Amino acid sequence: MIPLEGQVRIPSGCAVSAMISRDGRRMNGERIIESMVPMHDRSNGLGGGFAAYGIYPEYRDFYALHIFFSSRSAQSACMTLLKEYFEIVQDEHIKVRKMPQITDEPIIRRVFVSPMQSVLRHLQIDEKELVVRVVNRINAQSDGSYVFSCGKNMGAFKAVGFPEDVGRYYRLEEYDAYCWTAHGRYPTNTPGWWGGAHPFCMLDYSIVHNGEISSYDANRRFIEMYGYKCTLQTDTEVITYIADYLLRRQGLTLDEMAAVIAAPFWSTIEGKSGADREKYTYLRTVFPSLLVTGPFSIILGFDGGLMALNDRLKLRSMVVGEQDDMVYIASEEAAIRVMAPEIKNIWSPAGGEPVIVRVKEGAF
Amino acid sequence: MNFYPEFEVVRSDSRCIRCRVCERQCANEVHWYDADGKVMLSDESKCVNCQRCVTLCPTRALKIVKSDCRLRENANYSDQTIKEIYRQAETGGVLLSSMGNPNPLPVYWDRILINASQVTNPPIDPLREPMETRVSLGKKPDHITRNPDGSIDTKLPPQLTLSMPVMFSAMSYGSISYNAHASLARAASALGIYYNTGEGGLHEDFYQYGKNTIVQVASGRFGVHKDYLEAGAAIEIKMGQGAKPGIGGHLPGTKAVGDVSKTRMIPEGSDAISPAPHHDIYSIEDLRQLVYSLKEATEYRLPVIVKVAAVHNIAAIASGIARSGADIIAIDGFRGGTGAAPTRIRDNVGIPIELALAAVDKRLRDEGIRNNVSIICGGSVRSAADVVKAIALGADACYIATAACLAMGCHLCRSCHTGKCNWGIATQRPDLVKRLNPDIGSQRLINLMDAWRHEIKELMGGMGINSIEALRGNRLMLRGVGLTEKELQILGISHAGE
Amino acid sequence: MKRIYVREEWCLGCHLCEYNCAFANSGMTDMVKALRGKTIYPRIQVETDENGVTYAVSCRHCKDPVCVKSCIAGAISQKDGVIEINHDKCVGCLTCVLVCPYGAVVEDGSGVAQKCELCMKNACGAPACVKGCPNGAIVYEERGERE
């Protein structure tokens, strides 16, 4: 029997793509879907997905849970659990377009929730921590329910299939986002599972990733000390948890996080001046187990921006393009040229050098 | 009762040139020259098979072989078992042994195999790409704190920084010679790693190597004073030793001579007997008090290591230590060496380091306190491959002592307790001590560590890992062969093929 | 120039240097064949003082060598600092043995004088005693000139 996702570690190659408007202009999903077409061969049809930011302005105060259910009974059990912790603001189908390329679909729901204040007081935690705990619990423990997106005013859309088909399936042309990320998956040892497709999300962080990290188990065993459960055994999952841990729980900045997961070599650190050297030495010394080695290019989406980062040896391709208020990032330049045919300014960031793009304050 | 000797000296008379180097170099007085017959003769009953004569014989005229004259074969009562009974019947004494447990118990290192990258991610070539082996040992803060200007407060608890994850384990001045200590100290200093004083104090000549010295505080408190504590880079509280868990140390009065007695602060010629327990530590809360006493005494500048033998309950013990204020835990497995230990204890007490290490690392992670302490793994780490496996199981660094002794010339004859080490290591006899020239000893230690560092880098590169911290606890990089479900479960690794 | 120096603190008195010297100057390729059953006449000799301290003695290649001056046959010469004995010229008066303040010139077993020539003339090419010393007690190095 072929093992299912989560029962075995799944390395995979991939394609990534992203576009963001620094002015906070909202764009539909047409162009990001198109950008995946020239990179078709970087996927093998076993997973594609998108994350979109700014798509639920009317529900911006509520957590948008995107959930796969394998059955009605799983759905009702999960909803019962959610109601213990949250007010359910809205519970609806995510609209899809039936197509022959996408099969074996689960029940796909979107649930807007608001944490109950009484629960927060009782558990003595903030609302983000509550969302994390409940989502982790559902994903780790309950059979047949899988929350694949749980941020505010953002959402992930993913399925088994080629990314361009997945985009059409989810009717992404009907959503308007100031930032889109996309992913096509090339897993090497799984039959493919909807939940295993990227992006992988935690709160408003979403990660699309291309690579196979060699530090996986060191990273996993460390991060699992802090309440995270790596149920999928994928790189993306563990990188998402690392990002959540460093950014939300340790309060690091994006640059500081980059200095942990793609830490400069000691020889580079020695060459830096006083305060910088101290900072980098400190971060590497304090978080050695969160250094990520092996090839990766990731795009981390978050509320109000995104960050792209390569492993420190740049063992995976990633290019960045800039035109007016737009920034494009992709595994291949071809993808950027689809999104912005006239683009002039294209470059390849160095390994370990984060590219951080933020939307103008108050623009979204 | 007389036995036929355990070893035979086989001398090829047709090769022997009568240079008598064998005679001059055998502290056990096995060889002598018979001027009448113009031949070399030998008394094999004194031979310990240290191979000093074999090594120095310029014409390879000598070899030492195991005698085949044995008592009648018996799978239950082996020749050795019977002879030990005879010896005890004769003397009424406790049997003594040296170095690590030689019995054919499982060596888990040899049942673990290492991964390499193929296709889906690239191996990294250490000749062409940077490959980092530097590690920092010590407590890591739980939370980042920031200064008023928003920058990170970079003050850290005291750390030991190693250029590679290997250090020289505790061997006291007394159990080993001045020149052995000089070799270790100089090598550690040149390599950017650490050596450990053991419970024998620190000879005044070696204070200059303090930056690379771990000073030990053991149950006898020999050689401990304020300057000693402040001289080192870290303080190690020795609660136990893998070769002899549950008992203290014993330096015979014959070794407590001259500078040894001065350094230990004991009268010349008196036996230095460390008690089995620390008499101020009968429980974990007492340990905490000693940890903090030592930290107070050194103004919280130095990390404190607590060294324990790997025993059945090691995971819980380590968890207790991690909460005692200690910065680093050193675990010493049952195959670890010793200068002298009761044979029955050495061969029957304690557990394998591989299992102990895996259990401790897992327990500390389960309890969420793995970051409170670093783990040092010792007790028969024999090669760079063992180091890589130990790191992948969860160790931050390894302690080596037997391998270090071998680098200095030890031939593992396991006769340290006789004090007549022909290689100048485990002896205080001046004519023997001078056989270890620290210029050579330190260079050989440096060579060994350089070689291991290269091999560690090759193995890491193969796995696609370019920094040692990404290997630590990375158990997916390991697979077991020929291990039971239970063993795999304890080691936290899958079987090869899975 | 590079000279042989002994470090008595590391000399073990094992006498291996003597045998290595004798072999190196034997002209043979097998030590057993060269030395077995023979009395050796090495050019380096291990001495023991009254305290039991051992040290190897060989020619120091003095800057102003008495042996050269004392040779009645003109058999001893100094070339690039290295003092050599021409065995064909040596008449075996052994005056050099008597005048050497270090006892570094010795009789070679056949009646003529011999001394360390730093293995320059034999197959070794570098001092065999240094190479063979198990404890680094004999070194061959540049330490600057002396009288």
Image: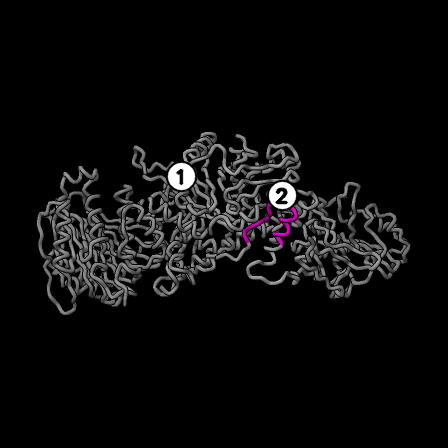
**Element under disc 1:** helix
Question: Which amino acid is tagged 1?
Answer: Gly
Residue B177: mark: 2
Task: Confirm whether circles 2 and 1 share one chain.
Answer: no
Please say if A101 is above or below A254. below
Residue farthest to the bottom, as pictured: A100
On-image quarter of the C terminus of chain C: top right
Relative image position of residue B417 (x, y in whole percent):
62, 46
State the separation of the CA atoms marked 2 and 1.
43 Å
| Quarter assignment of residue A86 | top left
Q: Which residues are magenta?
A: B83-101
Residue A333 visible in the displayed image: no
- Which residue is tagged 1? A274
Residue A138 visible in the displayed image: yes
User: In the visual, does B287 lie left or right of A80?
Assistant: right
Q: Residues within 10 Å of mark 2 (few under 14, many from 20)?
A: many
Please say if B478 is above or below B241. below
Question: Which amino acid is tagged 2?
Answer: Ser
Q: Is residue B93 magenta?
A: yes
Chain letter behind tag 1: A
